[in-house]
């Protein structure tokens, strides 16, 4: 009986090896679209391990590095000049025709719309850091640089969290205590459902800090709300966003180019979702929804190539 079992396992291993060999040969001989399709299937299986929640960090890191080498994750690297590494956005903060007030802080910048009143976008840059815990500030503050002077009382008993755009944790570990305090200015805050704020959105912020920074080094993040023409709900004077977007970019030194990915997340009670690819959209789609112009310092042709096509898969 043991001999039969060993024989069976031997045949199974042989079939697996043969299948892998055939798949590898098909992959090598395929054009880029077919290669991406094959990689997507492999990465679907890999993701069940990466996102399991019980997989050791070293294994996740190794699988991340494997994924980064695939076309499905790497995507297009668009040739471009080296960005300003000290700026909050690699090729300029988002441009607009809305007359937004540009607020510059120690670790991030904001485009604030006094007419709403609400921030329309926030940009920040993160990089390898020492994970030092700083005590969370106890209160939010009105921003005296804005004409609307939103106050924290407008959020009281509203049913919504005061959701950070540029996050407390990322700014604190990269820029220190004084910069952290500035993330609690209400010019950086939007109404956000608690489950999203403390759940999926926080997971995405942590993914950037715990995985993207380790994998890519310097990472730029631009983030903001989407408002409908006539918002259904308001918190005090502040419209409640219908969704939230995030544009993440990193510069590949070896390839002398930039790549970017955009996420669009509905404003819903969402604690967890391992399938982030479902939220991937083109940067051009975010521009259409917000009226913003990303990477304004890049030539138009470079912007078009970077922004027109969604990333094939979540990083």
Image: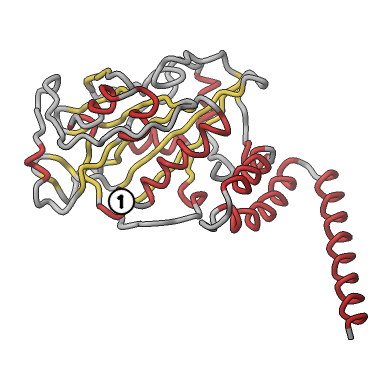
Percent from the top left, x then y, of residue 209? 45, 36
Is residue 223 visible in this depiction of the protein? no
Image point (42%, 19%), residue name = 296
Image point (28%, 25%), residue name = 177
The residue closer to the viewer here, 203 or 309, is 203
Q: What colour scheme was applied to this rendering of the protein? A: secondary structure
Q: What element carries label 1?
A: loop
Which quarter of the figure has residue 269?
bottom left
User: Is residue 56 rendered to the left or right of residue 124?
Assistant: right
User: Is residue 300 rendered to the left or right of residue 151?
Assistant: right
The residue closer to the viewer here, 147 or 54, is 54
Is residue 224 visible in this depiction of the protein? yes
Q: Mark 1 points at which residue?
A: 267
Mark 1, Cα crowd under 10 Å, few <14 / some 14-19 / many 20+, is many
Which quarter of the figure has residue 31?
top right
User: Is residue 154 rendered to the left or right of residue 164?
Assistant: left
The residue closer to the viewer here, 182 or 293, is 182
């Amino acid at each position: 009986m043991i001999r039969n079992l060993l024989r069976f396992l031997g045949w199974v291993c042989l079939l697996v090896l043969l299948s892998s060999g055939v798949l590898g040969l098909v992959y090598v001989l395929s054009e880029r679209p077919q290669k991406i399709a094959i990689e997507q299937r492999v990465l679907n299986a890999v993701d069940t391990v990466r996102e399991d929640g019980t997989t050791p960090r070293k294994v996740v890191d190794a699988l991340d590095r494997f994924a980064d080498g695939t076309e499905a994750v790497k995507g297009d690297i668009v040739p471009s000049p080296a960005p300003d590494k000290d700026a909050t956005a690699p090729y300029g903060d988002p441009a607009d025709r809305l007359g937004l007030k540009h607020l510059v802080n120690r670790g991030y910048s904001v485009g604030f719309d006094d007419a709403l009143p609400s921030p329309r976008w926030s940009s920040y840059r993160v990089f390898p850091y020492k994970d030092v815990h700083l005590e969370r500030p106890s209160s939010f503050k009105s921003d005296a640089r804005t004409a609307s002077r939103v106050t924290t009382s407008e959020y009281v008993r509203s049913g919504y969290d005061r959701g950070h755009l540029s996050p407390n944790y990322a700014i604190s570990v990269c820029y220190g205590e004084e910069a952290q305090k500035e993330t609690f200015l209400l010019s950086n805050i939007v109404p956000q459902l608690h489950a999203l704020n403390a759940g999926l959105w926080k997971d995405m912020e942590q993914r950037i800090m715990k995985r993207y920074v380790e994998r890519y080094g310097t990472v730029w993040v631009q983030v903001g709300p989407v408002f409908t023409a006539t918002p259904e709900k308001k918190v005090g004077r502040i419209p409640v966003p219908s969704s939230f977007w995030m544009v993440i970019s990193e510069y590949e030194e070896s390839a002398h180019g930039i790549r970017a990915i955009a996420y669009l997340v509905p404003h819903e009670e969402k604690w967890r979702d391992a399938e982030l690819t479902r939220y991937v959209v083109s940067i051009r789609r975010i521009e259409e929804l917000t009226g913003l112009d990303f990477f304004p310092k890049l030539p138009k042709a470079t912007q078009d190539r970077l922004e027109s096509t969604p990333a094939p898969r979540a990083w």
